[in-house]
Image (cartoon, rainbow, N blue to C red):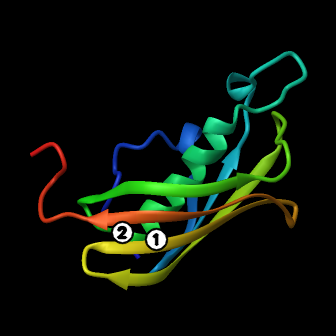
Amino acid sequence: MEIITHKKIVQALCGTPLRVEEGFSEVELLATENMAADESGLVHGGFIFGLADYAAMIAVNHPHVVLGSADVKFLKPVKMDETVIAEAKVVSKKGKRQTVQVTVQRDGDKVFEGEFACFVLDKHVLS
């Protein structure tokens, strides 16, 4: 399936899509040294959130999708040089709102989960 949203995303920062289907995506991110928040190699949570958000956006896969809100939990830390995979699934649609459940795992171990409220607008949010 062709990705028709967020076409200018820097995949090195937000993840590389592995699979995109109607209402579903799987996105992989290698945590790099540039993502580390400290000398121990702890990856800043914003990069994990960015991965999850990108996975949610391409699960919806509309050119004018935006994030309205998110209810998330960081469950375990991620270190640089680890690979994490986000899976996003649209679980409901009501009008312009689509609710997307996202989990992020490292080697089958869940490190993040969240519910994303995505909105499909009639035109680009900056129009």
Q: Nearer the viewer, residue 70 or 33?
A: 70
Q: Are marks 2 and 1 in contact (CB under 8 Å)?
A: yes
Residue 63 visible in rendering = yes
Q: Amino acid at mark 1?
A: Ala
How many residues crowd mark 1 within 10 Å: few (<14), some (14–19), many (20+)?
Answer: many
Counting from the top left corner in percent of width and height, residue 70 is at: 52, 56
- At 73% from the left and 38% from the top, the residue drawn is 31
Please tell me the numbered disc located at residue 61. 2
Residue on which the image places disc 1? 59
Instruction: Examine the rendering and report whether any part of residue 21 can be seen.
Output: no
Which quadrant of the view contains residue 80? Answer: top right
Between 102 and 14, which is closer to the camera in this rendering?
A: 102
Q: In which quadrant is the N terminus drawn?
A: bottom left
- What amino acid is at disc 2? Asn
In the rendered image, the residue lying farthest to the left is 127
Find residue 60 and report its horizontal and vertical position in percent.
39, 71
Left or right side of 102 for 90? left
Residue at horizontal 70 percent and vertical 31 percent from the top: 44
Image-based side of 89 in relation to 2, left or right: right
Residue 29, which numbered label? none
- Look at the picture and state if 29 lies above or below 34: below
